[in-house]
Amino acid sequence: MDWFREHPDVKTIRVAAADLNGVPRGKRIPARFADKLLHEGTKFPYSVLNMDIWGEDIEDSPLVFQAGDPDGMLLPTERGFMPMPWLEAPTGLLPLWMFHPDGRPYEGDPRQALARVVERYKAAGLTPVVATELEFFLIDDSGGQLRVPPSPRSGKRRTGAETLSLRALDAFDRFFTALYDACEAMDIPADTAISEAAPGQFEINLMHQADPLKAADDAWLFKLLVKGLARQYGFAGSFMAKPYDAWSGSGMHMHFSILDLQGNNIFDNGDEEGSDRLRHAVAGCLEAMPGSTLLFAPHENSYDRLVPNAHAPTGIGWAYENRTSAIRIPSSGPKARRIEHRVAGGDVNPYLTVAAVLGAALNGLEDRAEPPPPISGNAYEQGLAQLPATWGEAIEAFATCPQIKRIFSTHLIENFVMTKRQELHYMAELSDEETVELYLDTV
């Protein structure tokens, strides 16, 4: 409430929760109800967190007509009120998550799914430390063809990738300055920005958090911010996995380590290889990877990114300091020993992705699983077992994966499978242009 009291000019509030696709669902409410919202929350139908990418009910969902479409309770998360810098009028945002009326967490809420994994870690005396790297495109979608927007400074369009180019960053300096100011106002710990491997593509790292819920909140809010703020500058900010056929797509790489009760990194054994527990966590991630692919690549367009030699992993393997592998152990000092999971696209729901990765790692720790030997060289040429190559294959792998059933509730698994099967069915009716239009701003 502190932020809200410090801004008496705020006239309206948005309350929002993430649905299974990560799309914000919520309401616009007059600011005079702020105190009531903070203490009592509000109500949505449970089905609102289980809509398809068009915002339509899931056909034959037990949450809708069969149950009478009942309400769940939406209560504020720990974040409280924050600004929405991409709107013209001063506006407050209150992030929410869903509970049953009797106070039990609603298992179909993706943030609750991550909280469930965090509780498993707490029970084991462990704390994950998580950071994300988010890639996105700035796109001029005002015409019939997607293009790099003209620089607000020079009015010119740069058509090359310009990897790690200061010129590409400086061309959009006004946007990035506003973005960093907005991140500070929203308590999103934005760190380094770089230009990436495709025209108009950039990456911003979010700093590590010893709180996976905060790290996932940061990623979800960052995506809302980039998309909203870009429109103020006359272009789209898109986390779509693959907007351009000829260029690499966008990922959300996730770094994590794990602390014990004494604050020691359990992956650190003083050498470059890392501890036995690092290998166990890697093994868990590899074992769950086929079933998790639907969470890392949740949309039809996601599979255009997961192709060989396009800077996105396709094989199920791990390596030290090797960006062609699905799991990379970056070079670092021993105390910073960590795992980088590189499969997820920029179009993911951060809550489900963080839950899937951390849950799989904990499965491996619990089982004391051993991974295959780390690879060296080009992972695309190693003959590795492959990720599901199509959306349909990924849906079926997720639906039947025993590792996924250890991480997520049956209720969430069933809801997500129904959602994706419905989307798969109706996406067949869309042209390529309609597909891009659907995903460009939505995900």
Image (cartoon, rainbow, N blue to C red):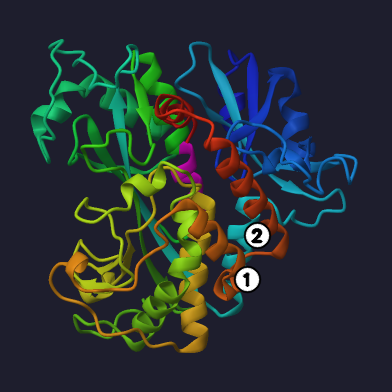
Asked whether, in this view, residue 417 is left or right of residue 32, the answer is: left
Residue 297 in percent (x, y) is at 44, 51
Magenta part of the chain = 214-221
Q: According to the image, label 1 marks what residue?
A: 405
Look at the image and tell me whether residue 207 can be seen.
no
Task: Give the answer, above or below, for where 7 lies relative to 264.
Answer: above
| Quadrant assignment for the N terminus | top right
Q: Earlier in the sequence, mark 1 or mark 2?
A: 1
Q: Position of residue 141 (x, y in %)?
A: 34, 18
Looking at this view, is 259 or 296 the one in front?
296
- Image coordinates for residue 33, horizontal then vertical, percent: 75, 23
Q: Which residue is mark 2?
A: 413
Q: Is residue 136 toward the left or the right of residue 436 in the image? A: left
Q: Main secondary structure of the magenta part?
A: helix
**Residue 397 drawn in magenta:** no
Local secondary structure at mark 1: helix
Comparing 423 with 41, the one in front is 423
Classify 51 as above or below 87: below
